[in-house]
């Protein structure tokens, strides 16, 4: 992004830091979402040990004309990765375009890392760019005039709004090089001298010029697993098939629409920053994130103690509230959204932000069904 965007981002970071300090001096005003004892560290497993299967078209998220179903990837040593049909389509587009342009696997991994951080592999319109809403999209952001899967800016010369709402164009522009649409201005990955010798997160940053350069690197294990799973273009068997080795437990296939919506909105928040006391989109604490998710689905929750509007359950379903770190009778220090399969979405802490992670990273878990709070 241009220098103006970098300065704006740095200013935003200072404002967030000031807000966090102010919130820390306040007692009882916001729900304190507890830190994990340690920072989560992912270890990438061997691609040969990863199991991949196709979820049913209605397993999670909205349908897509580009793919019949979502994808579940279970790499060795990593939490399972679940892609909606739309996310699967975007990932395959970046990989296919990379191959067409002669980009090696490492470059394809960098592109997926970038798209995971920028858009969670979704085509995003922008409320600040009304024309972008006329194109097919998976969600709506509001960062400057950034649109599309790579969140590039028409005003910075990356392309027209229509071009940037097309994942194929986004991939071509990100890779750049002699056959790229922007002719090295702005520069793409292939225009960065020596990109192959850079750390993958640094290579992504060399193209994106983000105000938060450290965020790309954390997606390397997931991006590597996605490229390994999709690179050959084959269609994996159903998640119930024995041909995939050990059975993978996908999400409950017959979820109600409200639960599918909750999971879809939870995914939209992945990659957001953790801001103590925050309620803004992708600048929230754990309860602010949960409140935003349910509000998008038409359920208005209180700012804190959100479990009080539901009922506790011993048989949780995806979309239910997860509460953790007991702090007294009917009081917990961390909240998130149950994703199924031992996983949850939450704004975990400032070190890792908002992500899909194993439930057992925190202790004292209970579940509440809030879907009756409409």
Image: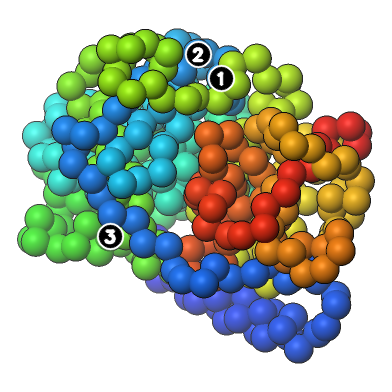
Q: Which mark is residue 56?
A: 2
Q: Nearer the viewer, residue 151 or 89?
A: 89
Establish if 79 lies above or below 374: below
Q: Residue at image x 10%, y 40%?
A: 104
Establish if 338 lies above or below 195: above
The x, y position of residue 44, in whole percent, is 25, 50
Q: Which mark is residue 59?
A: 1
Establish if 282 lies above or below 21: above
In the rendered image, which quarter is residue 159 located in? Answer: top left
Q: Are marks 2 and 1 in contact (CB under 8 Å)?
A: yes
The x, y position of residue 73, in whole percent, is 36, 31
In the rendered image, which quarter is residue 173 located in? Answer: top left
Q: Which mark is residue 201?
A: 3
SS category of the residue bearing label 2: loop
- Give the foreground label among 1 and 3: 1
Question: Is 28 displayed left or right of 4 in the figure?
Answer: right
SS category of the residue bearing label 3: helix
Q: CA distance from mark 2 to mark 1?
A: 5 Å
């Amino acid at each position: 992004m241009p220098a103006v965007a970098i300065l704006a981002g740095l200013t935003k970071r200072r404002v967030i830091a000031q807000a966090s300090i102010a919130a820390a001096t306040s007692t009882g005003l916001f729900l304190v979402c507890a830190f994990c004892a340690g920072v989560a560290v992912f270890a990438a497993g061997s691609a040969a040990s990863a199991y991949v299967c196709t979820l049913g078209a209605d397993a999670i998220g909205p349908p897509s004309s580009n793919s019949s179903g979502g994808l579940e990837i279970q790499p060795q040593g990593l939490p399972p990765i679940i892609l909606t049909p739309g996310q699967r389509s975007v990932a395959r587009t970046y990989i296919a375009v990379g191959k067409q342009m002669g980009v090696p696997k490492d470059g394809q991994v960098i592109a997926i890392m970038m798209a995971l951080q920028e858009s969670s592999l979704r085509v995003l319109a922008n409320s600040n760019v009304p024309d972008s809403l006329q194109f097919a999209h998976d969600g709506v952001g509001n960062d400057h005039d950034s649109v599309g899967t790579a969140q590039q800016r028409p005003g910075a010369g990356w392309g027209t709004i229509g071009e940037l709402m097309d994942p194929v164009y986004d991939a071509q522009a990100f890779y750049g090089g002699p056959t790229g649409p922007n002719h090295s201005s702005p520069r793409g990955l292939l225009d960065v001298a020596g990109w192959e010798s850079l750390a993958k997160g640094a290579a992504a940053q060399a193209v994106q010029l983000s105000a938060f350069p450290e965020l790309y690197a954390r997606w390397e294990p997931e991006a590597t697993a996605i490229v390994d799973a999709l690179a050959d273009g084959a269609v994996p068997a159903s998640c119930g098939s024995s041909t995939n080795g050990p059975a993978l437990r996908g999400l409950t296939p017959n979820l109600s629409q409200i639960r599918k919506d909750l999971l879809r909105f939870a995914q939209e928040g992945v990659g957001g920053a953790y801001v103590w006391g925050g309620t803004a989109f992708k600048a929230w604490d754990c309860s602010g994130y949960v409140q935003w998710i349910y509000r998008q689905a038409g359920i208005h929750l209180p700012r804190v103690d959100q479990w009080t509007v539901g009922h506790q359950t011993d048989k949780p379903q995806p979309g239910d509230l997860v509460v953790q770190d007991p702090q007294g009778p009917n009081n917990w220090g961390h909240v998130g959204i149950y994703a199924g399969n031992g996983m949850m979405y939450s704004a975990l802490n400032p070190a890792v932000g908002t992500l899909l992670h194993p439930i057992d990273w925190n202790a004292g878990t209970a579940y509440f069904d809030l879907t009756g709070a409409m």
